[in-house]
Image (cartoon, rainbow, N blue to C red):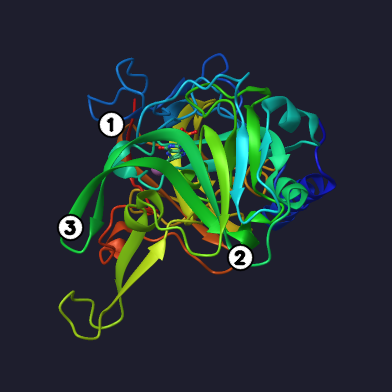
Amino acid sequence: MTTTKVTRRETLRTAMKAAALLSIPGWTVPALAEGETDVEFLDYPKTFNPNNPNSLTRLLDIRKIDGLITPADQFFAIQHFDQPAVDPVTYRLKFTGMVAKDVQFTLDDLKKMKSVDVVAGYECSGNSSRGMQALSSCGKFTGVPLSALLKQVGVKPRAREVVFFGTDKGPQDVVFRAQTFKLEQQFGRSMTLENAMRPEPILAYALNGEPLSRKQGFPVRLIMPGWYGVANVKWLSEIHLQEDRYLGNYQARWYRSLKGVGGTGEDTDPGTQWVETEITRLQLKSVVARVRKSAGSHQVIGFVLNDGTPLKSVEVKIDDGPWQKATLDPKNTKYSWKLFSYKWDGATPGEHTIVSRVTDMEGSVQPEAADLKRKKTFLQDNAQHPRKIKIA
Ligand SMILES: Nc1nc2c(c(=O)[nH]1)N[C@H]1C(S)=C(S)[C@@H](COP(=O)(O)O)O[C@H]1N2
Ligand SMILES: [Mo]
């Protein structure tokens, strides 16, 4: 297993930039030491159950974050159908459509190819304060760069779109004007050939150094660093090259953002334009995840998710106080989630509200909930998330 030069160089560059920018010493989130305690969050619903044995969905309890890498048995998991069991012996990854010739790879074929590691943090595009941000995690994925496979297979000149299918499928409504068809649909997602040929996307077979679990898409899944979770097709069985855009439910119908732009801000204002976009890159988000009491002070810990654009700052605000600069963990990498920490001195007993806000180098600032009022679809909710805690 090797790590590409690009990855290492990028990692180093990001870490150095972050360190230079914020001039901070290295830190991690160590396990709770003697005398340290976690501060209670008051905003969890009683029903919050991260490991419900009756659910195929697994939630991450973000109060437990203690490092960059989410352990595989805590990594969030969600999907639309079931979690298919794929036999690794008979497994074949098929390349079809506008390829030089139809080819299939066994799991061993893929494992014999030159592999890369990428630390990728991502969230479901439906992740938000309503679900206690529990549909997010960060892990080290190992696999084969998609570009290497596409080069090996050979792509016909007219191909523009790369479609990724999982083995999972089920009956679904496919709507055309007023007609609804109930049709067996395979889970599929696509991206342009240009994006597919970038160095980032990999066909991953391991998470944190172990084979993917069935929940995580065993034996092979796509990982598109910096994009929402829906791009990361699990139980990957077929990669199809085509000229047309792919219009499946999970691409063109259910996963899109619809928001009003311009005009007075009223939906009915004739100046309003309704803009629909695909769910691709992670929108800039930060969340306060954990507060711990240690040695007479408090440490506020949280994470940032974004598309890999370098960050300018993360700030924390307590009650009606000023925004205060947090420090970023130098272990963060370009596509990891980015852990941040803020030392809170003089915390008084009682209830408090804590919120974080991230700004990137391109000038994007994490919005407040009110700024997202004109977004009609619930996906891509990257609003600031004020947390309620109680200092004992
Ligand atoms: N084959 C398949 N892949 C899938 C899905 C699915 O339903 N089927 N769901 C997607 C969605 S919506 C998300 S958020 C991520 C979740 O990835 P995880 O379970 O590894 O956290 O898987 C994506 N990949
Ligand atoms: Mo998702």
In percent of width and height, residue 130 lies at 28, 41
- Tell which of 258 and 285 is nearer to you: 258
Could you tell which of marks 2 and 1 lies nearer the N-terminus? Answer: 1
Residue shown at 77% from the left, 36% from the top: 115
How busy is the neighbourhood of tag 1: few (under 14 within 10 Å), some, or many (20 plus)? few
Could you tell which of marks 3 and 2 lies nearer the N-terminus? Answer: 3
Could you tell which of marks 3 and 1 lies nearer the N-terminus? Answer: 1
- Tell which of 321 and 357 is nearer to you: 357
Q: In which quarter of the image is residue 111?
A: top right
Q: Is residue 346 visible in this depiction of the protein? A: no
User: Which quarter of the rendering shows the C terminus?
Assistant: top left
- Tell which of 72 and 115 is nearer to you: 115
Indicate if the residue with disc 3 has its beta carbon within 8 Å of ligand 1: no
Q: Which amino acid does label 1 sit on?
A: Leu
In percent of width and height, residue 186 lies at 40, 40
Left or right: 21 as drawn, with respect to 258: right
Q: Quadrant of residue 346?
A: top left
How busy is the neighbourhood of tag 2: few (under 14 within 10 Å), some, or many (20 plus)? few
Q: What residue type is labelled 3?
A: Gln
Q: Quadrant of residue 128?
A: top left
Residue linked to disc 3: 179
In percent of width and height, residue 41 lies at 33, 31
Q: Is mark 1 on a helix, strand or loop?
A: loop
Q: What element carries label 3?
A: strand
- Tell which of 326 and 271 is nearer to you: 271
Residue linked to disc 2: 361
93 w.r.t. 267: above or below? above
Left or right: 15 as drawn, with respect to 93: right
Task: Give the number of the mark in front: 3 or 2.
Answer: 3
Residue shown at 62% from the left, 60% from the top: 193
Residue linked to disc 1: 42
